[in-house]
């Protein structure tokens, strides 16, 4: 059995308001989210002895520990690759707890991504000169995530006959879930026709294929098994974890096969470590920076055959009352873009029975991220 | 080439590629030990871990593997330049270069469209490879 299996549990979550303009510093947002998560868990700030951050996070670690009043940190780490982090922070926290390097670890993400640095804007990524893989991309106008990830979407269409209307079915499902969620920034339901009428951003990607941009912060507290059982809420057990990659992820688009998700590798390991299979998963929280990547992930994580993700998402099959509910909070697409960490929070909420799109008798939830680069996944289990 | 884009910054692993462009030769890195193509250029062969490399002149003929049409100008400098195509061009030895597809409208680009390399000059005199449609491929 994996040493990580059930060694740690998620015990509390915290979120700020999600908005287009927070009017606050990212440090302030991070402090609020972490304080709320600790309160939710019923642990004191000084009991937190581990901290995991995204390497893209702008919040200064020293400032955060100072202002929060963290006094007893004995383990810190950070994870890269953007949206991969949503689950990789949890993987790192669980590993630290399993190893005894820390007992109670907080993972957080804070960003003013709409009022501050916008990932969809060329200016965010543009420089006079670019090295590494970017030297072979940006001079030809491959600037933003849509320009990179659109290449995968196109290749899936070429090889598997996937259609823009199928991307639209993902958008419709995510928006429906957000319409039930008062925290969500985009709550007006849409139809596939609305999706088809939205303007092209990076053809084949339309506006309604892209995640939103938002300001806010969220945090998750994890703790060791014995401690978790003594807290006031039922824990959500971290049953399986994985983080890793296949080959040739440099520059994202230089992979061998753009129609197959990188996370095929991560999927095998998360199921192996949890000792369960996709048929046992009750709902999936899938990193949705662009709608086609829900389709890629459904294939990679074994919910359908490779190439069949497009037809799988049709007819409401990924909606809350159907075959496999996906992103019951609305995801990056419609709730808020806090870089995938709210996906873990929604998994936790489903197991606690407090989702605004609650899945009947949810026992096992998969949260997985980023299918084009190094990726990560977590399986959480109800107590 | 699009105007106002970032310029490539060569390093010791990639310099022969950029030097080739100045001579209008498309030089691609291939493992001296096993023949595997490497892209982007790098210091080791992922197939056999050899650090020896040969720079082989490509025919410059390839096919469109995937592409997007950049419809939305993501930067003010692109306002008058959209829509433009950003494609992945499949060449020899399992190497795919990023390029724009010239010589046809964005909606004429399709999978496996045959293209050939051209070299385009930046304002500072540096040359970069790009691709244009050809009617028939070999
Ligand atoms: Zn080799």
Image (tube, coloured by chain):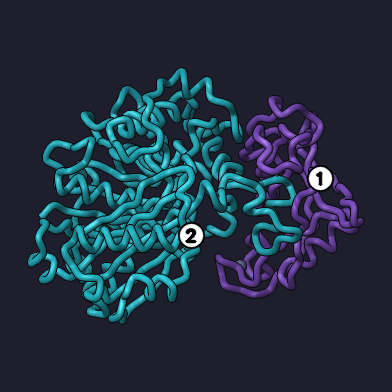
Chain colours: A cyan, B purple
Chain identifier of the residue bearing label 1 in the image: B
The residue located at (27%, 80%) in the rendering is A101
Q: Could you tell whether A220 is left or right of A185 in the image?
A: left
Q: Quadrant of residue A221?
A: bottom left
* Rendered location of residue A244, percent (x, y): 40, 62
The correct choice, above or below, for A178 with respect to A238 in the image is above
* Rendered location of residue A37, percent (x, y): 25, 59
Q: Could you tell whether A323 is left or right of A62 in the image?
A: left
For ligand 1, the image quadrant comes to bottom right
State yes or no: Cβ of the residue under disc 1 lies below 8 Å from any atom of ligand 1. Answer: no
Q: Residue furthest top?
A: A193
Q: Secondary structure at mark 1?
A: loop
Please rate how many residues cluster around mark 2, counting C-alpha atoms within 10 Å: few if below 14, some from 14 to 19, many from 20. Answer: some
Q: Can residue A246 be spotted in the picture?
A: no
Task: In this rendered view, identify the residue nearer to me: B134 or A169.
Answer: A169
Residue under numbered circle 1: B3
Distance of label 2 from label 1 (alpha carbons): 29 Å
The correct choice, above or below, for A64 with respect to A198 in the image is below
């Amino acid at each position: 059995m994996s040493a990580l299996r059930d060694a740690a549990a998620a015990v509390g979550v915290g979120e700020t308001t999600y908005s287009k303009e927070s009017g606050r510093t990212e440090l302030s947002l991070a402090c609020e989210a972490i304080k709320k998560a600790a309160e939710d868990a019923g642990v004191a700030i000084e009991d937190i002895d581990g901290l995991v951050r995204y390497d893209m996070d702008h919040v200064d670690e020293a400032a955060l520990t100072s202002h929060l009043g963290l006094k007893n940190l004995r383990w810190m780490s950070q994870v890269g690759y953007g949206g991969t982090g949503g689950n990789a922070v949890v993987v790192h926290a669980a590993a630290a707890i399993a190893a005894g390097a820390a007992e109670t670890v907080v993972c957080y993400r804070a960003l003013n991504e709409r009022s501050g640095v916008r990932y969809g804007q060329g200016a965010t990524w543009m420089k006079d000169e670019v090295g590494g893989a970017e030297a072979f991309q940006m001079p030809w106008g491959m600037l933003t995530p849509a320009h990179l990830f659109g290449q995968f979407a196109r290749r899936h269409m070429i090889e598997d006959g996937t259609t823009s209307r199928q991307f639209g079915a993902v958008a419709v499902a995510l928006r429906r879930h957000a319409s039930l969620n008062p925290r969500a920034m985009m709550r007006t339901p849409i139809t596939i026709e609305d999706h088809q009428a939205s303007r092209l951003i990076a053809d084949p990607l339309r506006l309604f294929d892209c995640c939103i941009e938002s300001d806010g912060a969220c945090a998750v507290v994890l703790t060791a098994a014995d401690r978790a059982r003594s807290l006031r809420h039922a824990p959500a057990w971290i049953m399986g974890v994985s983080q890793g990659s296949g080959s040739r992820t440099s520059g994202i688009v230089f992979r061998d096969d753009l129609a197959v998700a990188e996370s095929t590798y991560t999927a095998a390991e998360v199921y192996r470590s949890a000792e369960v299979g996709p048929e046992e998963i009750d709902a999936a929280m899938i990193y949705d920076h662009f709608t086609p990547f829900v389709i890629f992930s459904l294939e990679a994580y074994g919910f359908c055959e490779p190439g069949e993700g497009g037809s799988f998402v049709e007819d409401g099959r990924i909606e809350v009352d159907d075959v496999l509910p996906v992103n019951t909070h609305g995801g990056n697409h419609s709730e808020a873009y806090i870089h995938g960490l709210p996906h873990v929070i929604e998994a936790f909420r489903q197991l606690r029975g407090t989702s605004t799109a609650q899945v009947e008798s949810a026992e096992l939830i998969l949260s997985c991220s980023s299918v084009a680069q190094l990726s990560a996944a977590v399986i959480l289990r109800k107590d | 080439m699009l105007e106002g884009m970032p310029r490539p910054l060569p390093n010791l692993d990639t310099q022969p590629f950029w030097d080739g462009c100045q001579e209008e030769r498309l030089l691609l890195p291939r493992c001296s030990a096993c023949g595997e193509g490497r892209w982007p250029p790098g210091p080791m062969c992922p197939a056999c871990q050899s650090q020896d490399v040969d720079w082989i002149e490509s025919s410059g003929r390839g096919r469109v593997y995937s592409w997007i049409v950049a419809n939305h100008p993501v930067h003010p400098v692109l306002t008058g330049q959209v829509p433009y195509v950003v494609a992945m061009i499949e060449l020899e030895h399992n190497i795919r270069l990023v390029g724009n597809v010239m010589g046809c409208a964005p909606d004429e680009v399709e999978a496996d469209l045959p293209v050939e390399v051209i070299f385009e000059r930046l304002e500072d005199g540096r040359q970069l490879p790009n691709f244009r449609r050809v009617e028939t491929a070999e």
